[in-house]
Image (cartoon, rainbow, N blue to C red):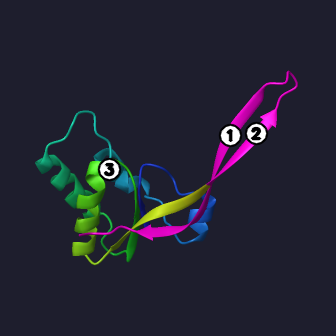
Amino acid sequence: MINLTMHPASPDQLSAGVINLDEGLEGVKRALQFETPPSSEEITARAEFIASAAVGYKSAMIGGALWLMAPLAAELRARDIEPLFAFSQRESVETVGADGAVTKTNVFRHVGFVPAVVL
């Protein structure tokens, strides 16, 4: 499974078979970033470009801008690549410092994948 997100896969995701993008695929990461609101044509072009980077893989972990995910999932399916979203459980950890201040930290634990539904 290729990682088509902006973030490196967690150790748990790597153990589940996710492969991070190598440096030759930096264009994919750029294609996931938007500086201005995109047109529908730009969304389609970027989805096609990103999906083309996953050719040769059976599945792809996706995530990012909501308006890109459905077109990207459709492009991946058109290439017989299963689009999947990571599913994490959030664990809240509170620690009390020496001064009595409470710090709350959210820890995300990868527990599986959810298929992207393409209508």
Q: CA distance from mark 1 to mark 3?
A: 25 Å
Q: Residues in magenta?
A: 90-119
The mark that comes first in sequence, 2 or 3, is 3
Residue 66 visible in image? yes
Residue 86 painted magenta: no
Q: Is residue 26 above or below residue 2?
A: above
Residue 94 is marked as 2
The answer to whether residue 102 is left or right of residue 3 is right
The mark that comes first in sequence, 1 or 3, is 3
Residue 115 painted magenta: yes
Q: Amino acid at mark 2?
A: Glu
Which image quarter holds the N terminus? bottom left
Q: Which residue is under mark 3?
A: 66
Disc 1 secondary structure class: strand
Mark 2 and mark 1 in contact? Answer it, CB < 8 Å: yes
Q: Position of residue 71 (x, y in %)?
A: 23, 59
Q: Which residue is under mark 1?
A: 105
Q: Position of residue 41 (x, y in %)?
A: 11, 49
